[in-house]
Amino acid sequence: MNMSSSNLTFIGKGYPEVDGFDNYGIPDVGNEFETIKGFSIVKDGIRIEGHDSDGNVISDNRFYNCGVYLSAMEYGGLNGPGDVVEYNVFHGGGIVLSYGGDGSQKIIGNEIYDADYGIVIAPGGGALQDIGEISGNKIQGCDVGLTLMLETRVNEVYNNVFNNTVNVKLHQDTYVYQYPQVNQWNKSAPIRGTNIIGGSYIGGNYWATPNGTGFSETHLDTDGDGIAEEPYNIEFFLKGRSEATTTSDIVVDYFPLVTPRVEPAPVYPVANFNMNVTTGNAPLSVLFTDLSENATSRSWNFGDGTTSTEKNPIHSYSLAGTYTVNLTAINPNGTDSKTAEITVLEKEEEEEENENENENENENENENENENENESENETKNLPVAAFTVNKTSGYYPLTVLFTDLSQNVTSRSWDVNNDGVEDSNEASFVYTYTSRGTYTTKLTVSNANGTNTETATIDVEKKSSGGSSSGGGGGGGSPEPAKNVETKELSQAYITNGKAVKFDFAKNATCVMYVSFDSKKTAGKTTTIVEQLKNKSALVSELPEGEVYRSFNVWVGNSGFATEKNIENPVIGFKVEKAWLQDKKIDQTSIVLNRYNDNKWEQLPANLSGKDDEFLYFTADLPGFSSFAITGTTKGLSEENEIESGPEQETRLADEGLKSMESETGQTSEEGEGAKAPGFGIVSGVLCLICIFLHKVGRR
């Protein structure tokens, strides 16, 4: 179908079949504001070319072994209305979507399958090509997904699925200024919303390959937000080369999409056993029964130099003594051990000979029994009492739970919340994330000089149903903060090695936090730190701190429970405060402090000014640990204003006010009649004192 003029609209009902559309015969003039919608196009495709071809809309069509060719020039670049190619489906063909021009075209929501070339962007008329946006497209099964020719410029490429033999191909030449460029392969920061693969955040693109080894297919999502925890240096092919390249810093997707999932936590063995007897006369035979969980093998040490690998062995002790029995449970992920004691007494004959002696000893013990009971009662009064609360007892994994210690008479504590026999934290309150299904017995052990006490609770972690996902994690994943209260967040990764200084830089400036650093006392490998800048008061605190609040934010370092005194030391936060906020709120710069929420209360941490520029003041603060924070300042008080007003005018004003006060007193005493003479003398003395003070201060000047 020949389009002989501009401003034509072609609407198909029920996708009628046509060969195609073109503006053959008027290419030097071009077409503007053509609309083609709702057709099945089976032969020639759509072709629009020429000067000033602008504002064309190609929407909701079906293409079979053909495509769209647009070639335009000289119509205003990014300021023009631009052509739009949206929500079309392409099956097969050579080049299915080719654009050559210098305008603000948008390529949105198309599906391209099994073509030689998916999208090809080429310059028009020798001028630099500007494309506004390529987003929401699925390009799959093609030889090459996206081709950028020399002198092409694309503003944003994001939220697309690339699953092709070659996903990106760039044409480069000897002149750097001619290289194709993409300003951003992702949004500046992840945006809450459903992305093209059903995740919760819109960020970069989904990078796959037909053989299933693409970046997005092989990188796990450790915090459940559907965005990989590291950038993707996009593999692209240069013109004339057969090998992939990843060296160009202009081809980086900082927020690549992945299927929201987490790596299953390794299953460790849990050693456990019982014995049919724990004491008896020699020779003593004992039946040991292995009750271990998740074990593939085991090793017994009976404490007398003999061992066994049987599941339920019987062992005989021939000599009297106390023996420590050790069972080690083993699986490919690790080992766990449990011990118990066996007491073997002398043979019965020897016992009878010493019977009278033992009776005498028992009598002596009974004499002191009452005294010992009284002492025990006094000590019991000071024994520790374990108690704690959890904000959740069940949910879908990854499940994030806040544990709060409510124990009494405690000098130390130890949490084991995942049944592995290893301490997870010693903080009074901390957060832990369960990453695999199961029923977990969480245990808090508290101690003081008089003893220990434990308290347990059960956490049920379930698998997500196939019908959807749970919002149990909150805060954009890996955080107990509700997602609706998170304004923005930024992630940073670093390797943590024992004895080394670690620094997490937040280069995107998405929040008020510039960096987090500390000295590591334990090797943890590659670790992610997340900063959440909040819209309002954190849900994890009871109230805001005193003063004018600039920002509230949370800092999560690694898995919950890692950033403790046992693992790190000398933690520091670098943050920034807008100068405009200080001016608007009349905040005293020296009053800026960082507040940390700990043990159900706020503590103020001094902030040290480290630098400034035209927009921000930069501060650092030493920390005792990481948790919820708030940056605050105080307004300039009246006391400062009074200090500024300290000249002769103020002193004269004070003297005048004093005289008026005395005149008032004189009026009162004259009404009192008798007895007024004494007060009058006091008034005169007061006036003389004020005058002397005034003259003295003037003389000092």
Image: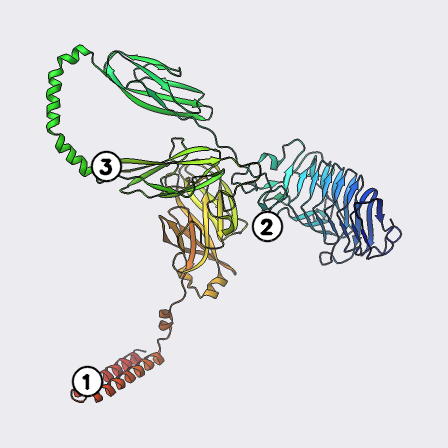
Examine the rendered structure and indicate whether residue 290 appears above or below residue 692. Answer: above
Residue displayed at 51% across by 32% down: 264
Q: Earlier in the sequence, mark 2 or mark 3?
A: 2
* Quadrant of residue 373 within the rendered picture: top left
- Which residue type carries mark 2? Ser
Q: Residue at x 31, y 83 (%)?
A: 656
Q: Is residue 92 visible to us here?
A: yes
Report, in whole angstroms, how far the alpha carbon at label 1 lies from the one at label 3: 70 Å
The amino acid at mark 3 is Asn
Considering depth in this image, is 383 or 523 the residue closer to the camera? Answer: 383
Q: Residues within 10 Å of mark 2 (few under 14, many from 20)?
A: some
| Mark 1 residue element | helix
Q: Nearer the viewer, mark 2 or mark 1?
A: 1
Circle 3 is placed at which residue position? Answer: 450
User: In the rendering, at what x and y percent does residue 325 appear?
Assistant: 32, 20
To which quarter of the image does residue 147 belong? Answer: top right
Q: CA distance from mark 2 to mark 3?
A: 57 Å
- The amino acid type, in three-letter code, at marker 1 is Pro
Per the rendering, the mark at residue 679 is: 1
Q: Residue at x 69, y 36 (%)?
A: 164
- Residue 125 appears in the picture as rendered: no
Q: Provide the residue designation for mark 2.
A: 188
Q: Which numbered mark, 1 or 3, is in the foreground of this view?
A: 3
